[in-house]
Amino acid sequence: ELKVEQNPLFLSMQEGKNYTIYCNYSTTSDRLYWYRQDPGKSLESLFVLLSNGAVKQEGRLMASLDTKARLSTLHITAAVHDLSATYFCAVGSGTSYGKLTFGQGTILTVHP
Amino acid sequence: DTAVSQTPKYLVTQMGNDKSIKCEQNLGHDTMYWYKQDSKKFLKIMFSYNNKELIINETVPNRFSPKSPDKAHLNLHINSLELGDSAVYFCASSQSETNTGELFFGEGSRLTVL
């Protein structure tokens, strides 16, 4: 059974600082997704990583995928308050492309 | 225009009742899903339909019955509601031909069973 673990689960950052959220998964997959969820809101797709070594950047966020290590990272550069949200990684399994197994989520709070 | 829309957004009901949640997507996707998010924010897939055909059916009590009248709509009917059914139910859609598996989620329907 595929298991996905994120850490940390809670992250309190000061504005301007850098930090990384880690996503480990237990079985082979080459499809990994990062989503953002604001309180009481939907899940917004941030990144789709489909191959080993994939790296994508959008603004202050950068995601990478190492399929051999079964690890993805979400790096936050110079955090700002607007990045405060819950971040989920999700891993695709087999040929059921929409069957995603989600991590527990990382609650990010950025303080002034 | 909302891409994936769900109704109702909030639903409060008594144990034992039957309720339905509706979902519609205007993205032209051929695959739709129901995911459940529990009180600890954990998300788990329940069902998936591709062109009105059920393709994913996770271990879900048979009190839950999805129905897809066409590829743009996916409804979820829940019989004999229990306290543990309280959660946020998210509808999502994707296009199978892209092979990316990227899901587009609705706003969620928060179900509270008293």
Image (cartoon, rainbow, N blue to C red):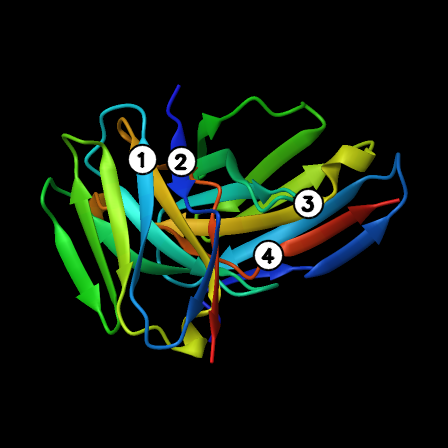
Chain assignment, label 4: B
Residue A98 picture location, percent across and down: 36, 39
Judged from this view, the residue extending furthest toward the top is: A1
Which residue position is annotated with label 2?
A5
Amino acid at circle 3? Ala
- Mark 2 and mark 3 on one chain: no
The residue at the point 64 percent across, 32 percent down is B65
Helix, strand or loop for disc 3:
strand
- Mark-to-mark CA distance, 4 and 2: 23 Å
Closer mark to the observer between disc 3 and disc 4: 3
Whichever of callouts 3 and 4 sits on the residue coming sooner in the sequence is 3
| In the depicted structure, whether residue A104 falls above or below residue A40 | above
Q: CA–CA distance between discs 3 and 4?
A: 10 Å
Residue A49 is labelled as: none
* Residue type of the residue flagged with mark 1: Asn
Q: Are marks 2 and 1 in contact (CB under 8 Å)?
A: yes
The amino acid on which the numbered mark 2 sits, given as a three-letter code, is: Glu
* Nearer the camera: disc 2 or disc 3: 2
Residue that mark 1 sits on: A24
Q: Chain of mark 2?
A: A
Chain for numbered disc 3: B
Q: Residue A112: x percent and y percent?
A: 47, 80
- Do the residues under discs 3 and 4 have CB atoms within 8 angstroms? no
